[in-house]
Amino acid sequence: MRTFDRALLADLNVFVTIVRRQSMRQAAIELGVTTSALSHRLRKLETELDVKLLNRTSRSLRPTEAGALLASQLEVGLQAIDDALGTLLHQRDHPAGRLRLNALRDAASLILRPIVPLYFERFPDMHIDLAVDDHLVDIVEEGFDAGIRYGDRVPQDMIGVALSPPLNWVVIGSPALIARAGRPQQPQDLLDLPCIEMRVGDNSRYQWELGNGPTLVRVDVRGPLCANATDQAIEAALQGLGFAYCLEHRVRQDVAVGSLEIVMPEWSSEGPPFTIYYPSRRQVPPGLHELIGLIREDQGLARLATRANK
């Protein structure tokens, strides 16, 4: 296939406009240039092609036989380009297609679940293929368009966009457990109490982080159960098996009704926000920007940062 430079394509568009308008003056008005500039472009095109394209007199303008054939074929090609650009612009404003996401369980519950109905209401031609997985994955190798992780777990070679304020982590326990085992007052007290251990995405055991900044301490807790999902840890805490460590927002309702209590609230810890990430700013999959925009606009996310205004 022949390669066309910008100047030649622009001159061909000038020629088609002249033929369609059958007037140099009208074509110049449509293209926003002077008639002399138009005449210069046309002469340049005829010289480059070495074919006379128009017969012009002081009163008339008609394409030659070769010019008429060229104009009719170009009209088809330019219409195809216009249709393609129209489709592209429509997809920009009305995205359609499949968006493949890999998200943490907590992110799927707190970030995606509230917004997905509105997303499909606004963009009914989109389809989200969601994999909920707390393990670290290579989204490119696994064929995902984007991933959602905590901000400090986003690979450095990815484009990351924060979806939430910083997240608040707390220690929780059931009233029955507190009555039986006692209420911890300091992080070190947890070492002598039953706790729900946590296993994170790289399959390592997680040391609970309590406090912030210079007062932050890490506690290597032990207990009867090790969970790799927040749902498991919260359920175990509800059953009184041990104290658990989780996002405050995940247990808001349980705390409100008294099924769970936040212990040592002064030792709650602020962590990185949920962050969506993808390989490049170029060729962003259809619907991704729209999803990010809806999530960031969601006023409910402000509740995730319960300590922001304290």
Image (cartoon, rainbow, N blue to C red):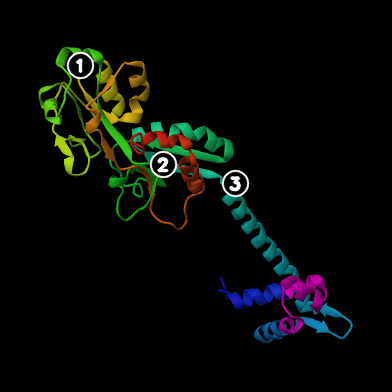
Residue of label 3: 94
What's the residue type where badge 1 is placed? Ile
In this rendering, position of residue 11 left or right of residue 202: right
Residue at 28% across, 30% down: 246
**Do the CB atoms of the residues marked 2 and 3 lie less than 8 Å apart?**
no
Q: Residue 17 in magenta?
A: yes
Quarter the N terminus occupies: bottom right
- Prevailing secondary structure class for the magenta stretch in the rendered image: helix
Cα–Cα span, label 3 and label 1:
53 Å
Residue 178: which numbered mark, if any? 1
What's the residue type where badge 3 is placed? His
Q: Who comes first in sequence, dot 2 or dot 1?
A: 2
Residue sitting nearer the eye, 296 or 73? 296
Residue 101: which numbered mark, if any? 2
Cα–Cα span, label 2 and label 1:
40 Å
Quarter the C terminus occupies: top left
User: Can you say whether 301 is above or below 279 in the image?
Assistant: above
Which-is-in-front pick, marks 2 and 1?
A: 1
